[in-house]
Amino acid sequence: MNLELRTSNLSIIGTGYVGLTTGLGFAELGNRVICVDIDKNKIQGLKNGIIPIYEKGMEELLKKNRKRISFTTNLRKAVKESGVIFIAVGTPAKDTGEADLSQIIDVAQNLRDAIDSYKVIVIKSTVPVGSVELIRDILSKKKREGKDFDLVVNPEFLREGDAVYDFFHPSRIVIGTNSRRAADILLKLYKPLNSPTLITSPIDAQMIKYAANAFLASRISFINEIATIAERVGADIKNIVKGLSYDPRLGEGYLSPGIGFGGPCLIKDLKALISIAQSRDYEPRYLKSILDKNEEQMKSIVVKVKKALGGILYGRTLGILGLSFKPYTKDVRNSLAMRIVELLKLEGAKIKAYDPIAMDEARGLISDIEYLKDPYDLKEIDLLLILVGYKEFKDLDYAKIKRGMTNPIIIDGVNLLDPAQMRSSGFIYKGVGR
Ligand code: NAD
């Protein structure tokens, strides 16, 4: 009975995209949740109701659950008051590609001292093979597995931009553990979501996450490869994708040609998986080709811009629509739009850019371009480049934008607009694979 009472008290360590979504989601399901972070400003902001990220529905969720969720930098106190501890700190890529586990190690060291009774420690961060053993070794210096703690790998599959929806409608829940006791506690916690649930070993759970992201990345690189060929043979990738997606074996997800995949997960997780394979004496050439195609695709956009402007970008002014790594997120980590901006700048182009959501974050990464408050301020530009597929970009009055353009050229990196319509409006229009 005592266990029942305490397991509905949760701590989430790391209050970023994953941690905050998980915390708010479990609070909405009726649990008492303590969100912990080392970032004092973030915690103070959250205490004042300020959400540091943009996610649909999150503000309402916070307002509704103020009594069930709290925010703190005090890990020890949070752990003392919780039966289940989720770890959701970052696992960024090192320069070598392997995952940087320093945040995880830091948390494990703090947990080692804070654990005062049986806790289920749930690793939600995406962690490479060997991490569970690492955490176990750190904890085992002072605490006993099975008595003081059990470990679970519970990978997260949410999509930024749809994170709240995804919490309540998970495609599946993977519980990777060798402990029946810990599995039962998590099954109970997740029961209200009524989702397909898989209990596996910790290693299988880790590999499911890496394989899922590698597969999603491979679909994007695959369709970009086909788009590149379509351009050369004069086919339209939009029709090709339609023709593929009617086939239930293929489906339609992650088959949008564009500038490539960026963001905080796909690239880093693919690099980590490559690094895991290499550390086991296997050279994963197929996985490497997915990354290579992605890099080539991103650079091909710059080539298109150059070609459209006669080969020289020095002194030309380019308008950019979209900077985040995908629509409806403030997240610019590993955003290919930002990398393209960097490459265009290196070629000597002057940039005027607009993004409906991620302007402040973009400014934090690249300060020396002109950020516009309104897309209709895109004036005196030699070319317009669309890099993120925000729906509102589709509905812009392009005739109005055209009046401010020196050349009526649009490079649509995400195939957002209708080529025939743009051409009949007097634009020189180039999409991807069409
Ligand atoms: P994030 O960078 O948004 O959040 C991490 C948080 O952890 C930050 O707020 C940071 O201040 C905090 N932190 C760092 N060290 C800490 C410590 N020692 N103690 C307490 N807090 C600490 O990261 P994220 O995007 O939420 O990703 C977290 C993990 O989930 C990563 O492993 C990522 O690969 C994985 N993941 C992310 C997504 C996504 O879409 N963002 C999806 C699935 C899985």
Image (cartoon, grey):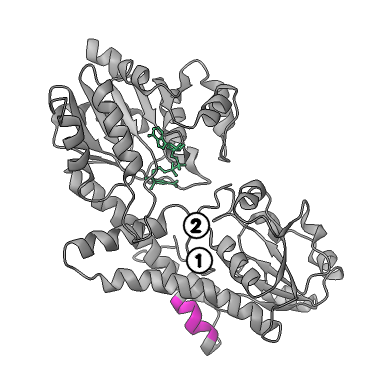
Q: Is residue 383 above or below residue 356?
A: below
- State the SS at label 1: loop
User: Which residues, given as a range, are shown in magenta?
Assistant: 225-231
Q: Position of residue 356 (x, y in %)?
A: 68, 50
- In whole angstroms, how far apart are the C-alphas of marks 2 and 1? 19 Å
Q: Position of residue 230 (x, y in %)?
A: 51, 83
Q: Is residue 355 left or right of residue 175?
A: right
Residue wearing tag 1? 256
Quarter holding the N terminus is: top left
Q: Is residue 21 left or right of residue 115?
A: right
**Ligand 1 shown in quarter:** top left
Query: Is residue 361 visible in the rendered structure shown here?
Result: yes
On whether ligand 1 comes within 8 Å of the CB at mark 1, the answer is no
Q: Quadrant of residue 153?
A: top left
Quarter holding the C terminus is: bottom right
Q: Residue at x 30, y 55 (%)?
A: 210
Earlier residue among tags 2 and 1: 1
Q: Is residue 390 above or below residue 348?
A: above
Name the residue type under label 1.
Ser
Query: Is residue 432 visible in the rendered structure shown here?
Result: no
Residue wearing tag 2? 334
Q: Is residue 23 left or right of residue 383?
A: left
Name the residue type under label 2.
Asn
Crowding around mark 1 (Cα neighbors within 10 Å: few <14, some 14 to 19, many 20+) is many
